[in-house]
Structures are given as C-alpha cells and as structure tokens.
C-alpha cells in the first residue's frame, strides 16, 4: 500500500481524488470541519510528499494513496484496499482531472489519451470499484465543468470529456435512485489551481475566461450543499448558469464560432 501505517479502521470512509490541492483540498478541508469524527478520509493524489503533508493538516483519520489514476494498477490498489476492509464508503468525490488549452492538432496523441484516461476512464472505473461498498445514504460526486454544456474550440478534448461525465452522472443518478445512493455532478468554471501550469494561468488570466474564474472553496461549499439536497446537477456560478441557458436556446454553431474566435485571439 501507499502508506506505511497498518490500517484496520472500520469507520465509514470518504474517498477524494486529486486531494492534495485545489478543489480536492477544498472538499477535504470543508468535510474535515463538518463530518463526524468517526469518518475517515482516503486521500488520493500523485505527489506523495505533498499528499502526506496535506493529510497531516486534517483532524480526521486519513489514509494516503500516492497514485496516478491513469494507470490501471493504481485502481487495483484501491480495489484491493476496499476488499481487505469491507468498510462502507459514505462519499466518493471523483475530482482528479486535467486539461490544457490549445488547438487539438498542436497537441500529441499521448497527451489527448491521458486527458481521456484521467477525466473519463478513471472516474468511471473508480466509481465501479467503489459502488459495491456504498449503501443507502451514500453519495457520489463527479466533477464535470461548465465546459460540458457545449463544444469548445481550443479546449476540445477537455470539454468533450466533461460532457461525457455529465451524461454519465445523470444516467447513473437515475440507476441508483432506487437504492437511495445519490449522484451529484458539479459543473464549475475554471479555478486558479494546480490544474493549470504557471504559463497556463498567465494565458487564462489574459483570455476571455478570466471573467469566469471561481474560488475552489466556494465551489466545494455549493457542491456539498447540492449533495445534501440530493441535486443531480449543480452549476456553481451565475455565469455558468447563463452559459448553460445559452447552450439550450442559442444555435450552438454560433456559440462555437464565437468561442473559437476568442480562443484564437488569446493564443
């Protein structure tokens, strides 16, 4: 396993991916303040030192997994850990994701594959692994994006991957409704987190998307509130809600061309 401590707790578990920074860390801190002490956190992120340092800042019991979820062996680690314990997963937060702006033709095929692996396959596979350990009252959060509401030139694969998650989450919510396991798909705007490199942050702040930047703490609060209300889809900003509305009523080819023009001008 990825931690050095023998782990035998039978407490309910919250699993958070991408947990060491950004939105994942915001979720962890918020839940650390609000959940009962007997709930343990399983934190998943790639960088072990950063993950362990973050875990030490929490009050709840934690177990840290330094894993790259694009690798199937990493998912097997979580599967084996759950099977060895047989504990109940109270909440799964599928948060880990990646993406970079730029023309599709200028990016490598391996990079496009890695976006699909992390943003789609990892969320679906981890959900499949964890679901047998959930019971009535458990909840699942899938992290999508405002980008899910319409295709985005200059962010093509990322937006498509988030549209997949939105569709998957809405269907899964209905499948799990009779079991009273809730599914919430959160759709935030961009956040200035480690998701973006310093260069990408500079580009973001100089582009039209700078007007849509959200605070991860705000997004975490809005999302957890939606989970408690058993809402299936939550859009965490007013601008995001406007984008969702426009995507329904304005011909998408007009919006796509406008977005494409803005993306080219910001490059």
Image: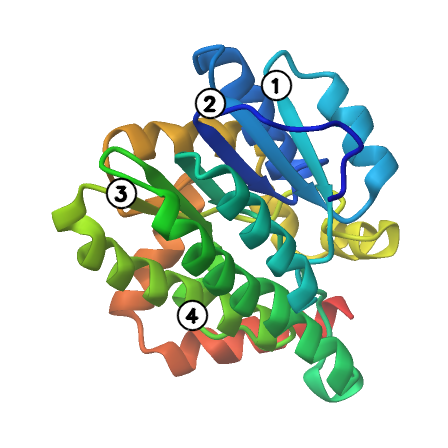
First-in-chain label (3 vs 1) = 1
The answer, for residue 99, to whether it is visible in the render is no
Between marks 1 and 4 in the image, the one whose residue lies nearer the viewer: 1
Q: From the viewer's perspective, is 199 left or right of 20?
A: right
Where does label 3 land, which residue?
A: 182
Between marks 3 and 1 in the image, the one whose residue lies nearer the viewer: 1
**Distance from Cα at disc 1 to Cα at disc 4:** 33 Å
First-in-chain label (3 vs 2) = 2
User: Which numbered dot is residue 11?
Assistant: 2
Given residues 33 and 239, the one toward you in this image is 33
Residues at marks 2 and 1 touching, judged by CB atoms closer than 8 Å? yes
Between marks 3 and 4 in the image, the one whose residue lies nearer the viewer: 3
Where does label 4 land, which residue?
A: 164
Q: Which residue corresponds to the image point at 27% horizontal and 47% vertical from the top-left?
A: 232
Between marks 4 and 2 in the image, the one whose residue lies nearer the viewer: 2
Q: Is residue 1 above or below residue 228?
A: below
Q: Is residue 46 above or below residue 19?
A: below
Q: Which residue corresponds to the image point at 22% horizontal and 37% vertical from the top-left?
A: 136
Between marks 2 and 1 in the image, the one whose residue lies nearer the viewer: 2
Where does label 1 land, which residue?
A: 61
SS at circle 2: loop
Question: How far from the left and from the top, in percent, is residue 116?
Answer: 60, 73
């Amino acid at each position: 396993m990825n931690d050095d401590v023998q782990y035998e707790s039978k407490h309910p578990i919250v699993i958070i991916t991408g947990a060491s920074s950004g939105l994942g860390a915001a979720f962890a801190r918020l839940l650390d303040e609000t959940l009962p002490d007997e709930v343990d956190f399983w934190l998943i992120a790639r960088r072990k030192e950063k993950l362990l340092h973050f875990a030490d800042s929490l009050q709840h019991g934690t177990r840290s997994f330094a894993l790259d979820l694009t690798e199937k062996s990493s998912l097997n680690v979580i599967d084996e850990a759950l099977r060895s314990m047989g504990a109940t997963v109270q909440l799964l937060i599928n948060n880990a994701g990646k993406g970079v702006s730029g023309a599709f033709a200028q990016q490598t095929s391996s990079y496009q594959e890695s976006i699909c692996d992390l943003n789609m396959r990892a969320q679906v596979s981890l959900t499949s692994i964890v679901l047998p350990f959930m019971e009535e009252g458990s909840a699942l959060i899938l992290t999508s994006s405002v980008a899910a509401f319409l295709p985005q030139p200059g962010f093509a694969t990322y937006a498509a991957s988030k549209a997949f998650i939105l569709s998957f989450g809405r269907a899964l919510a209905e499948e799990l409704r009779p079991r009273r396991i809730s599914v919430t798909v959160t759709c935030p705007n961009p956040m200035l987190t480690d998701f973006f490199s310093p260069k990408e942050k500079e580009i973001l702040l100089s582009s039209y998307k700078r007007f849509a930047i959200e605070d991860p703490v705000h997004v975490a609060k809005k999302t957890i509130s939606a989970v408690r209300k058993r809402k299936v889809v939550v859009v965490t900003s007013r601008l995001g809600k406007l984008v969702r509305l426009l995507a329904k009523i304005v011909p998408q080819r007009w919006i796509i061309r406008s977005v494409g023009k803005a993306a080219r001008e910001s490059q």
